[in-house]
Image: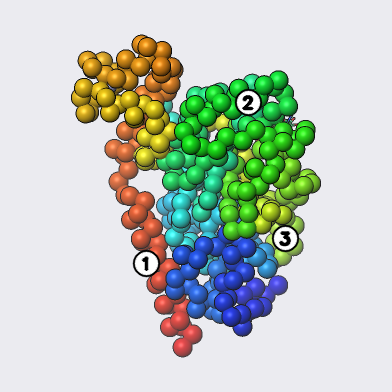
Amino acid sequence: MTNPCATHPQRRNPLDHLFQLGWKKNTVLFLEDMATEPHCVARVISVQRNLFLVSNAQEEWLCSAAGKLLHAKNADFPVTGDWVLTHDKHITAVLPRQNMLSRGEAGSHDRHSGIAQKTQPIAANLDTVFIVSGLDRDFNLRRLERYLTLVYNCGINPVIILTKADLQNAPENFQMEVESIAFGVPVILCSAKNMQGKEEVEQYIQRGQTVAMIGSSGAGKSTLANMLYGKDIQITAHVSESVGKGRHATTHRELLKMPQGGMLIDNPGIREIAFSEGGEGIQRSFEDIEQLAEYCRFADCTHQTEPGCAVLRAVQNGELPAERLESYHKMQRELDYLESRSTKSADRIEKERWKDVALRIKDLKRRRR
Ligand SMILES: Nc1nc2c(ncn2[C@@H]2O[C@H](COP(=O)(O)OP(=O)(O)OP(=O)(O)O)[C@@H](O)[C@H]2O)c(=O)[nH]1
Ligand SMILES: [Zn+2]
């Protein structure tokens, strides 16, 4: 295969086909007049060390990252779900991200605080994150709280999927229990045994939507993906194309095009849930505590030892489980720490990214003249 962009040079709206891959109208801007350029826009389907499988909805091809990106800081390295500019089988720029699901890297924890020191990006540009939890030994409200906060912190909408509903006589009780800690978050009961929940879940994977799944190993993510897909998903992409010095590569597909029209990202199980950045997540996942806090005597009450604390009173009355408050305090400590550590806001990173993309396009146009 030669230049994949050269195949469709005369399209009326050259980015039309990208909508199938989840391209959003509001991210088009000045990129629309560029698809006839040798740089073209593609989405990252999977990442394997420094090899990227990308797609423009018509073709898939392998790219390596331009040197500049390879040496860039962690945050600039292309991840699954990223929109990128490619040129001669090189990714030259990562387009600004709508959002990024990331977490603290396993094994990078500070010995004293227990807080992750490094961020591990999981996926970019998501509309929804499915938090998958099995109704077996995997079920754990405190863990779900952490997942919710993690997803909210990244500015993405969570949906909780309780799999293996067939293992319980009254799965609705679990659903209600989860609803009581996840205010306004859809909680869907699913079973691969009898296709329960399939239609409810399908509304989130319609055309243009991108969804990632997170949950512990064995939670039932792959089984759920297969149920939605209708058959076992073939995740190995045999891209028989020479890369670099005549190397042929086989890679995994992480971003899956679903028959419902949307894209689903399956990631290796997240066994450890550490936060990677400060954000508003905790206020949203602990709305009950936030509401109670309005009645605390002091506006800056930390709900630990203060007199007149409405939150502590609720624990004493049995209205609020003590473990939930404990979980809140623990997350608050982690997030406070991260906030104090972050030096550069996400906004600034995205602004710089736009500048970089604009420069790259300008440079390209100049060279063509
Ligand atoms: N009874 C029942 N078992 C299920 C259901 N869904 C998944 N399982 C079983 O749970 C086990 C784990 O399911 P997987 O889909 O492999 O879990 P996973 O989340 O993809 O696990 P990782 O790949 O390790 O992240 C398998 O033995 C499945 O057969 C279900 O709806 N009902
Ligand atoms: Zn208080």
Identify which residue, 170 or 3, lies in the foreground. 170
Task: Specify the amino acid type for callout 1.
Answer: Lys
* Circle nearer the viewer, 2 or 1: 2
Identify which residue, 166 or 222, lies in the foreground. 166
How much space separates mark 2 and mark 3, taking CA atoms? Answer: 45 Å
Locate residue 55 relative to residue 297 in the image: left or right.
Answer: right
Q: Position of residue 148 (x, y in %)?
A: 48, 35
Locate residue 57 relative to residue 181 in the image: left or right.
Answer: right
Say which element carries label 2. helix
Task: Specify the amino acid type for callout 2.
Answer: Glu
Q: Position of residue 27 (x, y in %)?
A: 47, 64
Q: Quadrant of the N terminus?
A: bottom right
* Circle nearer the viewer, 3 or 1: 1
Q: What residue is shown with label 2? A: 172
Mark closer to the chain start, 3 or 1: 3
Mark closer to the chain start, 2 or 3: 2
Q: What residue is shown with label 3? A: 239
Residue 135 shows up from this direction: yes
Say which element carries label 3. loop
Residue 117 shows up from this direction: no
Q: Mark 3 near mark 1, Cβ–Cβ under 8 Å?
A: no
Quarter of the displayed picture in which ligand 2 can be seen = top left
Identify which residue, 89 or 322, lies in the foreground. 322
Q: Mark 2 near mark 1, Cβ–Cβ under 8 Å?
A: no
Q: Position of residue 26 (x, y in %)?
A: 46, 65
- Tag of residue 134: none
Q: What residue is shown with label 1? A: 355
Say which element carries label 1. helix
